[in-house]
Amino acid sequence: MRIIAGYAKGRQIKSIPGLSTRPLLEKVRGAIFNILRNEIMEKEILDLYSGTGSIGLEALSRGAKSIIFIDNNLVCVQTIQENLKNLGFADYATVYKNDIEKALAIIARKEFKFDIIFIDPPYLKNLCEMNLKLVEKINILRNSGIIVIHHHKKEILPEKFKNIYLSDKRKYGDAIISMYSIKSSSP
């Protein structure tokens, strides 16, 4: 894997051997950042189920202000930390080893707000809708923010929740990228 664009363009990202993670394909990662191209610079980002950190590292390379990575796997956390150090991004990121629900509770107590939240849970574990509801409930997305969720095509997500709505959806093979925004920002 490598960084597609920005400051660290072409630099390698350390991956994790085996099938414990499902790294976001470069094609899909590129598509996400083509959609978000004007939304990344100087933004504060949360990356849930970070895996190797590829999506967050790409965001930092493209000018994100800061990022919090969360994963419950120690090998993933260590890999992200190594990738941050190797790419020179360690000062712009924080990496937590924690369960997503516990981590989000801590973030809510600290009253953090994010411009972009990436959610990339394991496929077909019924985590996508639960995570969207939780993020909405604890109110950590800024009013102009975007939630980007990577899920399997068999996992159908609602178009609307209480305060967020599906603003964009793209299919890439078995993968779907669904983007949600705050309802008040809809036309």
Image: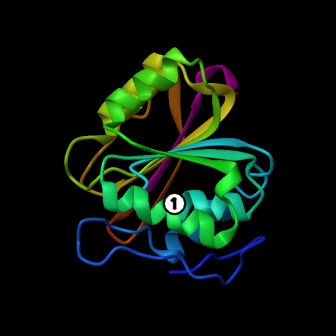
Apparent side of residue 187 relative to residue 160 in the rendered image (left or right): right
> Which residue position is annotated with label 1?
81
Q: Secondary structure at mark 1?
A: helix
Magenta stretch: residue 33 in it? no
Task: Please name the residue shown 35% across and 39% down the image.
Answer: 98
Q: Which residues are magenta?
A: 177-185
- Residue 186 in the image, given as x and y percentages of width and height: 66, 28
**Residue 161 visible at all:** no
Nearer the observer, 12 or 158: 12
Figure check: 109 above or below 118: above
Task: Please name the residue shown 53% across and 19% down the image.
Answer: 139
Apparent side of residue 43 relative to residue 19 in the rendered image (left or right): right
Apparent side of residue 164 relative to residue 52 in the rendered image (left or right): right
- Residue 141 in the image, given as x and y percentages of width and height: 59, 28
Residue 153, quarter of the rendered image:
bottom left
- Residue 46 in the image, given as x and y percentages of width and height: 55, 41
Task: Please name the residue shown 80% across and 51% down the image.
Answer: 41
Magenta stretch: residue 183 in it? yes
Q: Amino acid at mark 1?
A: Gln
Colour scheme of the picture: rainbow
Figure check: 100 above or below 50: above
Q: On the rendered image, what quadrant is the C terminus found in?
A: top right
Figure check: 34 above or below 43: below
- Residue 147 in the image, given as x and y percentages of width and height: 54, 40
Nearer the observer, 74 or 165: 74
* Crowding near the residue tagged with mark 1, few <14, some 14–19, many ≥20 C-alpha atoms within 10 Å: many
Task: Please name the residue shown 44% across and 67% down the image.
Answer: 24
